[in-house]
Amino acid sequence: MTERAWIASRKGLFELLQQNGRWSLGPIAFLGEPVSMVLADPRDGAVYAALNLGHFGVKLHRKDAGAAQWTEIVAPAYPLKPENSADPVDWTVKFIWSLACGGADEPGVIWAGTLPGGLFRSADRGASWTLVHSLWDAPERSEWFGGGYDVPGIHSICVDPRDSRHVLVGISCGGAWVTHDGGNSWTLSAKGMRASYLPPERGDDQNVQDPHRIVGARDTPDQLWCQHHNGIWRSANFGVDWQEVSPAPLSNFGFAVAVHPADGNTAWFAPALADQTRIPVDAALTVTRTTDGGRTFTALRAGLPQQHCYDLVYRHGLAVADDGRTLLMASTTGGVWLSENSGDSWRTIASSMPPVYAVCFG
Amino acid sequence: MATLIFTPQLARFTAAPQIDTDALTLRAGLETAFSANPRLRAYLLDEQGCLRPNVAIFIDGRTVRDHVRLDAPLTAHSKVHVLQALSGG
């Protein structure tokens, strides 16, 4: 039974609790501080919160199952940049943009994706972190560029539930990359994506794709979904190749995607107008849902604001619970909505929250 | 002994009491504080050892412009204020 969710916002981490069948906001942690990412680890019940303090840098906290307090743990950090390095990138963590649990067979393993594009791995629940040099040192990284931020960043980390050494990451803008050996080696894995924001001769270049968000299905792990900058793509083979869902409903553009944990043909999206306006189509907030692998979509509007709505849902602003029916969505202008029927109807949880960066259940 | 005085805002996150040091440079003085509370280092310096962009340091009322070397001299009577830069608010 789904009982708890988390809302990471510009002004703190909000807990959303279901009590007596009703969801309501509960305790607030880090009030006033930007919380860029939150991760609930189902393996041990711990919750991780990444802070991006305006003055004092990126921090990471963990709250263990049953604990009353959060504890600051070590945040990912780059090694000293070699003096002879020709890399123009500043080797400092600007932002933790994604957190993911390792596989069920590797308790304590946590992955972190950051701006400016470094992937980090912890084997000890965040007591220490190691930069994944094999990806950071890839020559192709010099071609990555910022998407949404001035520098590139890793926002999606998909761990294959059948094989913990099989991991795919999504980078804005650097395509998708996959490892089969736990991160020792990586290859580009964005074949089939197309970038309409570059000259035509570069459109198929895997290394310049902007996959806004990539998520996988728990029980059908070969199936991945990607809300790309200019369309929706899906993969039936864990990213070996990708097929565009065409035409995407309402708009090609959006940031978020959530996939049903038990049914990889069912996914939800939050389309918006590209590129400069970035508002809901017709200023009416809509979630789109496919249940047939992208052949058809349903526009879901019940309970969502349909007039003068300018809420934008970021990459991590839409999540589905393990039951496949409970959805949580939150926006950059502080709207929070919950659905308990697969998106058919929504209830407003709050309409004046701080800007929301990420939501998750657990 | 030079004296380092930290913004009380730091205390929301980690211990940063006023500290006296006989260090002769700013970086050495900061290291004195970090030895008392190792966690403080990552609040003031990034992983490359540079002062975070939105932290401001004044030595005897004068702004420290160099955020990389941090080798400004300290005297036995220096008062070092480590503050939040308004840019980071």
Image: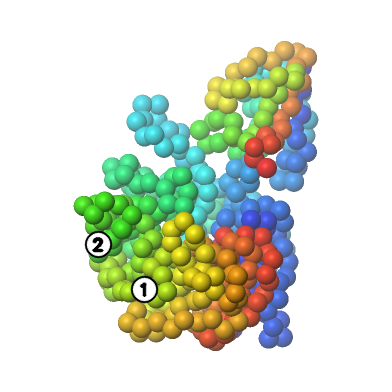
Closest to the camera, between mark 2 and mark 1, is: 1
Residue under the image location 55 percent in, 78 percent down: A327
**Under tag 2, what secondary structure?**
loop
- Looking at numbered disc 2 in the image, what kind of residue is underneath it? Lys
At horizontal 41% and vertical 37% (from top left) the residue drawn is A89
The chain that hosts pointer 2 is: A
Q: Which mark is residue A191?
A: 2
Closer-to-camera residue (B58/A250): A250
Q: Which mark is residue A248?
A: 1
Give how far apart the Cα atoms at labels 2 and 1 are.
Answer: 19 Å
Please give the chain letter of the residue carrying mark 1.
A
Rendering quarter of residue A151: top left
Q: Nearer the viewer, residue A63 or A289?
A: A289
Q: Is residue A270 above or below residue A28?
A: below
Left or right: A128 in relation to B15: left
- How crowded pointer 1 is (Cα within 10 Å; few <14, some 14-19, many 20+) is rated as many
Residue A274 in view (yes/no)? yes
Q: Which of the two labelled residues, at mark 2 and mark 1, occupies the earlier sequence position?
A: 2
Q: Position of residue A177 (x, y in %)?
A: 32, 57
> Residue at 63% of width from left, 46% of height from top?
A53
In depth, the one of A277 and A1 nearer the eye is A277
Task: Have a look at marks 2 and 1 and say if they share a chain.
Answer: yes
Indicate the position of residue A8 as horizontal and vertical percent values. 61, 61
